[in-house]
Image (cartoon, helix red, strand yellow):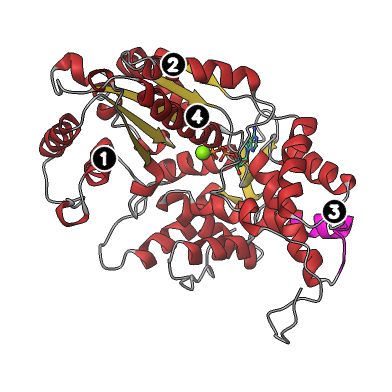
């Protein structure tokens, strides 16, 4: 292990191969997914056979292997086509171009992506560095024209994989045009197949009928894993990542049980938990991961997750959470809607001095507040004094949220944490 004396070294090392626990590692085998893989393989069969490609829409909760299975099948498809081409005469060669786009990467500062930006992404993926286009400065129709021209420069089949496709938002032009681009006459050289991947059920439900018709030709559901399946997946990963003796079967079982209970069967969560546990055990100088390391790791991740989901909220909701943070610190929660609105208005004015943007009305703010209740950030306390006694609501942070987490989320979003004076606001 470490023979150099360094402040960065730990006395013991449990992690043999950290790469295997990284987010972008592609496992060599996809475990516990035989049914789904069978269905998914059928989607790719026409491409292998040199026939027109199919479109498909994959959905399921976060961390259930949608991206991993797609990468795995993509690699196999490319590999097998290469082998098949070795046997085929020149005029029967199968040409496959894969364009993989993670729509999340085209999210702008105001947390919006659009068909337009994804189209820019596709163009830039197909062009070399010197010829890339910028995300501003073109009319949308021009970008689509350029994109179809670029696609038509290729040969054979183009498979466009749109991961995290829900980030595309309301403007789903691309999602119905791209799968039909040959029928519409936008391209004639190539056949375009589209795979959309999403963990957002509302997005899937709200897709326009046109998109459902074209993109969702085949729908594949990835169910959540149960604790046993998580154990199998995690066990295989641990075997590659950790030294023998650094963990026990109990380590795997506990990490899997926690990921099952707390993260609705996410393999990503189980893997992160194992990695964090191993790091904590190393810092602790322990030769094997102990239960207390896993418990601590679980707490760390939970904290990070809440902060992350606060970061994902839009500005209005962040302002409301900040208002609640100040009210909470001043002992003014639970607070009535009008109290929150008064604090929220001060927050909005402080952050928008230059633009002069106005706060929403109490009614408008209440709609956002209700969403925060629905997402579990905020609790409502119902006061109902019966007939004649009146009825009102108060709000406070749920057990998962506290002012520090809101503050951390602001830091993550690169937003300053302005002092807001809530004195003088009536409780
Ligand atoms: N069946 C499996 N066998 C082996 N590893 C798996 C399996 N399913 C998931 N994993 C691993 O779990 C992690 C999360 O999986 P993946 O990224 O595919 O989730 P996802 O469904 O795409 O989630 P999201 O919707 O958040 O993008 C990855 O490290 C992946 O390698
Ligand atoms: Mg994914």
Residue tagged 3 = 247
- The reply to whether callout 4 and callout 2 are in contact (CB within 8 Å) is no
Comes first in the chain, label 1 or label 2: 2
Q: Residues within 10 Å of mark 2 (few under 14, many from 20)?
A: some
Comes first in the chain, label 2 or label 3: 2
- Taking 425 as reference, is 222 above or below it? above
Instruction: Kindly identify the residue that appears in the image at 26 percent across and 68 percent down.
Output: 354
Comes first in the chain, label 4 or label 2: 2
Comes first in the chain, label 1 or label 4: 4
Q: How far separated are the C-alphas under marks 1 and 2? A: 24 Å
Callout 3 secondary element:
loop
Residue 62: which quarter of the image?
A: top right
Tag shown at residue 122? 1
Q: How far separated are the C-alphas under marks 1 and 3? A: 44 Å
Label 1 CB less than 8 angstroms from ligand 2: no
Callout 2 secondary element:
helix
Front position in the image: 138 or 341: 138
Residue tagged 4 = 73
Label 3 or label 4, whichever lies nearer to me, is: 4
Instruction: Tell me which segment is drawn in magenta.
Output: 286-297
Q: How far separated are the C-alphas under marks 1 and 4? A: 21 Å
Q: How far separated are the C-alphas under marks 2 and 3? A: 41 Å
Label 3 CB less than 8 angstroms from ligand 1: no
Tag shown at residue 45? 2
Label 1 or label 4, whichever lies nearer to me, is: 4
Comes first in the chain, label 3 or label 4: 4
- The reply to whether callout 3 and callout 4 are in contact (CB within 8 Å) is no
Label 4 CB less than 8 angstroms from ligand 1: no
**Is residue 238 visible to the viewer in this orientation of the structure?**
yes
- The reply to whether callout 2 and callout 3 are in contact (CB within 8 Å) is no
Callout 1 secondary element:
helix
Q: Residues within 10 Å of mark 1 (few under 14, many from 20)?
A: many
């Amino acid at each position: 292990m470490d023979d150099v004396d360094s402040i960065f070294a730990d006395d013991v090392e449990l992690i043999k191969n950290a790469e295997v626990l990284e987010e972008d590692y592609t496992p060599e085998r996809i475990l516990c997914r035989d049914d789904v893989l069978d269905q998914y393989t059928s989607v790719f069969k026409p491409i292998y056979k040199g026939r027109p490609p199919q479109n498909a829409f994959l959905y399921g909760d976060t961390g259930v292997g949608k991206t991993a299975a797609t990468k795995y099948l993509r690699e196999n498809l490319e590999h097998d086509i290469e082998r098949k081409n070795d046997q085929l005469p020149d005029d029967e060669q199968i040409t496959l171009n894969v364009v993989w786009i993670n729509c999340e990467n085209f999210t702008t500062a105001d947390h919006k992506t659009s068909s337009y930006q994804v189209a820019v992404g596709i163009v830039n993926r197909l062009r070399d560095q010197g010829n890339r286009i910028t995300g501003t400065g073109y009319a949308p129709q021009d970008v689509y024209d350029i994109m179809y021209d670029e696609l038509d420069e290729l040969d054979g089949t183009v498979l466009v994989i749109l991961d995290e496709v829900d980030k595309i938002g309301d403007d789903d032009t691309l999602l119905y045009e791209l799968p039909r681009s040959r029928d519409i006459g936008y391209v004639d050289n190539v056949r375009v197949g589209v795979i959309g991947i999403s963990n957002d059920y509302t997005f899937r439900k709200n897709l326009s009928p046109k998109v459902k018709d074209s993109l969702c030709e085949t729908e594949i559901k990835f169910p959540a894993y149960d604790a046993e399946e998580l154990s199998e997946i995690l066990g295989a990963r641990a075997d590659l990542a950790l030294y023998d003796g650094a963990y026990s079967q109990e380590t795997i079982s506990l990490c899997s049980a926690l990921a099952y209970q707390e993260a609705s069967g996410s393999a990503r969560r189980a893997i992160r938990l194992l990695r964090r546990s191993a790091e904590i055990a190393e810092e602790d100088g322990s030769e094997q991961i102990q239960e207390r390391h896993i418990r601590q790791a679980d707490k760390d991740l939970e904290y990070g997750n809440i902060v992350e989901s606060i970061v994902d909220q839009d500005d209005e909701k962040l302002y409301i959470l900040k208002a609640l943070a100040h009210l909470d610190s001043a002992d003014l929660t639970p607070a009535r809607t009008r109290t929150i609105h008064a604090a929220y208005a001060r927050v909005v004015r402080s952050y928008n001095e230059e633009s002069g943007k106005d706060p929403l009305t109490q009614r408008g703010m209440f709609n956002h507040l209700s969403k925060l209740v629905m997402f579990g950030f905020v609790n409502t306390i119902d006061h109902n004094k019966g007939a004649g006694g009146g009825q009102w609501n108060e709000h406070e942070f749920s057990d998962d949220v506290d002012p520090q987490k809101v503050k951390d989320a602001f830091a993550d979003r690169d937003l300053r944490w302005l002092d807001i004076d809530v004195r003088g606001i009536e409780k």
